[in-house]
């Protein structure tokens, strides 16, 4: 398996360079290759560098040392605009804080993502995926008119609207109660299987991590993979 065939790859990564100046001395010689279609969980405590690692994998930040590849492209060779163009239509995100546009309805939030991904019939696609997540009756509601679980369902619909090749999830149930969080996870994995998307999520929740094919622990700036069997 070469770097070009991997969905995400970082080699010998050391401190992450954020915004071009701020060095975050969190990661030490991290190596990780994620292949197409895999589900990968990165476990770690607060401040362990999980979000930094996710940002590197997605090309939101670049390492000060090492190589960073995404879907066959070496991100080190691209500027910020080039990395953003690479993510468009290939990468989806689900965040703990939802990050919906407050002045846009549920439908408009999802439509915008579909349009940015080049979807020709963005409204139809948005309506379809919002129906899949059970929000067909909440299309015109603004984020503040939705519950936390409903907002996260919109966020998931938005993430999958562009049919991404790879999805990054950062503590996707962190702001939800246990019951709602479990429903969100079921939905996330259901859509992931349906679209065959590569999934990389970071979490502090061991039970959630064990839903993934691979589980990695981030400790003292390094990754340690545990043996994992999923039925």
Image: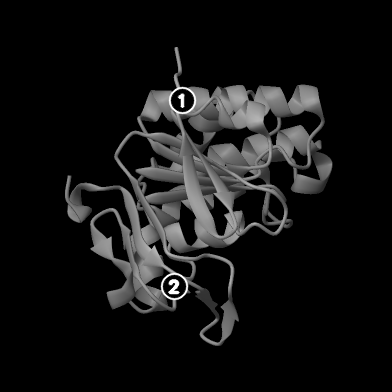
Looking at this view, name the residue that lies furthest to the bottom.
Answer: 21
* Relative height, residue 95 to residue 153 (above, below): below
- Residue 89 screen position, x and y as percent: 36, 52
Depth order, front residue of 166/207: 207
* Residue at disc 1, secondary structure: loop
Quarter occupied by residue 74 = bottom left
Q: Residue at x 65, y 26 (%)?
A: 207
- Residue 71 screen position, x and y as percent: 28, 53
Tell me the quarter of the image containing the C terminus. top left
* Residue at disc 2, secondary structure: strand
Q: Read off the residue under disc 1.
A: 228
Depth order, front residue of 73/140: 73
- Residue 90 screen position, x and y as percent: 35, 51
Q: Is residue 15 left or right of residue 48?
A: left
- Residue 34 screen position, x and y as percent: 35, 44
Quarter occupied by residue 163 = top left
Alpha carbon separation for disc pair 1 and 2:
30 Å
Q: Mark 1 near mark 2, Cβ–Cβ under 8 Å?
A: no
Q: Read off the residue under disc 2.
A: 62
Q: Is residue 160 left or right of residue 205?
A: left
Total label count? 2
């Amino acid at each position: 398996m070469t770097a070009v065939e991997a969905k995400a790859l970082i080699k010998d990564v050391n401190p992450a360079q954020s915004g071009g100046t701020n060095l975050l001395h969190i990661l030490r010689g991290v190596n990780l290759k994620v292949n197409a279609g895999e589900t990968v969980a990165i476990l770690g405590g607060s401040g362990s560098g999980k979000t930094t690692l996710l940002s590197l994998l997605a090309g939101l930040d670049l390492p000060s040392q090492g190589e960073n590849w995404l879907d066959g492209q070496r991100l080190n060779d691209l500027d910020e605009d080039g990395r953003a163009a690479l993510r468009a239509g290939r990468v989806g995100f689900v965040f703990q804080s939802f990050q919906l546009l407050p002045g846009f309805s549920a439908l408009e939030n999802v439509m915008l993502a579909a349009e940015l991904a080049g979807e020709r019939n963005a409204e139809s696609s948005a309506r379809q995926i919002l129906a899949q997540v059970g929000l067909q009756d909440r299309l015109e509601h603004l984020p503040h008119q939705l519950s936390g679980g409903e907002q996260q369902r919109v966020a998931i619909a938005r993430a999958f609207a562009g049919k991404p090749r790879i999805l990054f999830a950062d503590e996707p149930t962190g702001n939800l109660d246990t019951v709602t969080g479990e429903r969100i996870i079921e939905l996330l994995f259901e859509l992931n299987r349906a679209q065959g998307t590569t999934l990389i999520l970071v979490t502090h929740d061991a039970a959630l991590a064990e839903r993934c094919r691979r589980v990695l622990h981030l400790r003292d700036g390094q990754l340690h993979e545990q043996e994992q069997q999923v039925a």
